[in-house]
């Protein structure tokens, strides 16, 4: 029996698209088969999670499911009996193929066969080729999750994905890859039936956090500490970027929270043509130890140069 996709993701039918994305990402991080090598049912549960997400992430498909037009596997409900009658016919070649019955409901299997064949260009639905032999069926797509370090995602690179059977495949991470993005590796999925080609590997990326950089679209945001004298007098300092350190001019009288823009120092996505910017937010940091000279200077300055940065705020609050 097909499980309700909302139950699989731990959601109600009122969930937003953002709720669906967050629930899926959370489950991907905890349920991938690689994390449970001794659990024989881990791969099946992970595939169930991926199937539920595929159905609900698309608003149109989700609406059709909610309206009862399709079931949780994506099959058309009105055509179900047709699939059942066709698949259970004793002389049908798919029925005769050894091991077919062991995989579950023939109606669901035949619906999947039709979808796979349609994807390959609409082959003859009789299930036979010109010579009368059973037709080839493409292998299923297999889904995997891959955790990618932050800098590898924004810069691009190559990582190795370890499969449940212990083998590995190289995965090219495109520049500017984002969290939740799915990459398709053609021919790296399940084995086809007969002479059918293998399916594809669908790899969902989970991008890690970084201690210095945050990403906002194609822009990178950094909080840069500066000293009191740099804030008051201005200075040239070294600031980190995703491509390496650069020189940055701090203007005079810079306050904490002021944002400076380094144009073109953000994320450069594959095929986008232009890169985003890096936004540098200044944060004034007092010295850990204040010597007598600085203390005396500030005490004297406060007597003659009193300045209340909260005055306007208090006046506005009272009006």
Image (cartoon, rainbow, N blue to C red):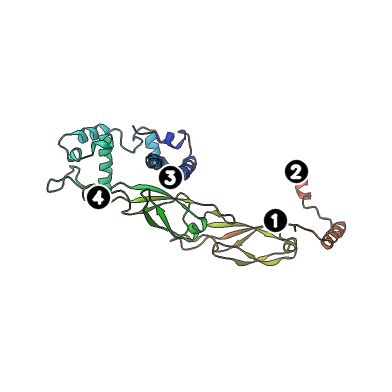
Q: Residue at x 81, y 55 (%)?
A: 307
Which of pointers 3 and 1 lies earlier in the amino acid sequence?
A: 3
Q: Residue at x 55, y 57 (%)?
A: 219
Q: Residue at x 28, y 32 (%)?
A: 78
Q: Tag 2: Cα neighbours inside 10 Å, few (<14), some, or many (≥20)? A: few
What separation in Å lies between label 4 and label 3 (alpha carbons)? 32 Å
Q: Residue 279 lies in what quarter of the image?
A: bottom right
Q: Can you tell which of label 2 and label 4 is closer to the viewer?
A: 4
Q: Tag 4: Cα neighbours inside 10 Å, few (<14), some, or many (≥20)? A: few
Which of pointers 2 and 4 lies earlier in the amino acid sequence?
A: 4
The residue carrying mark 3 is 32
| SS at mark 4 in the image | loop
- Which quarter of the rendered picture does the C terminus lie within? top right
The vertical placement of 229 against 63, above or below, is below
What separation in Å lies between label 2 and label 1 (alpha carbons)? 22 Å
The residue carrying mark 4 is 121
Locate residue 61, reporting x and y percent.
Answer: 38, 40
Left or right: 251, with 106 as reference point: right
Which of pointers 4 and 3 lies earlier in the amino acid sequence?
A: 3
Q: Residue 62 lies in what quarter of the image?
A: top left
The residue carrying mark 1 is 256
The residue carrying mark 2 is 317
């Amino acid at each position: 029996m097909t499980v309700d996709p909302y139950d699989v993701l731990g959601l109600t039918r009122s969930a937003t698209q953002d709720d669906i994305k967050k629930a899926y990402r959370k489950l991907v991080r905890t349920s991938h088969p690689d994390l449970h090598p001794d659990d024989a049912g881990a791969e099946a549960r992970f595939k169930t999670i991926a199937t539920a997400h595929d159905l609900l992430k698309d608003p149109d498909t989700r609406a059709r499911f909610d309206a009862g037009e399709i079931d949780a596997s994506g099959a058309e409900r009105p055509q179900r009996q047709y699939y059942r009658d066709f698949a259970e016919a004793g002389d049908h070649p798919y029925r005769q193929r050894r091991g077919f019955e062991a995989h579950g409901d023939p109606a669901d299997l035949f619906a999947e066969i039709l979808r796979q064949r349609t994807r390959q260009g609409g082959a003859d639905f009789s299930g036979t080729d010109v010579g009368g032999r059973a037709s080839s069926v493409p292998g299923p797509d297999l889904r995997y999750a891959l955790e990618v370090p932050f800098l590898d995602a924004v810069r691009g690179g190559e990582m190795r994905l370890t499969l449940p059977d212990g083998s590995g495949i190289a995965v090219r991470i495109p520049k500017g890859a984002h969290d939740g993005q799915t990459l398709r590796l053609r021919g790296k999925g399940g084995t086809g039936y007969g002479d059918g080609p293998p399916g594809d590997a669908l790899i969902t990326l989970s991008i890690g956090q970084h201690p210095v950089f945050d990403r906002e679209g194609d822009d990178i945001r950094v909080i840069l500490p500066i000293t009191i004298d740099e804030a008051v007098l201005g200075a040239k300092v070294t600031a980190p970027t995703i491509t390496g350190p650069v020189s940055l001019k701090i203007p005079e009288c810079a306050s904490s929270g002021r944002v400076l823009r380094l144009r073109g120092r953000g994320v450069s996505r594959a095929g986008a043509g232009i890169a985003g910017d890096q936004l540098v937010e200044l944060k004034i940091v007092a010295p850990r130890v204040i010597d007598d000279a600085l203390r005396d200077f500030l005490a004297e300055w406060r007597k003659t140069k009193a300045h209340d940065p909260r005055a306007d705020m208090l006046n506005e609050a009272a009006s």
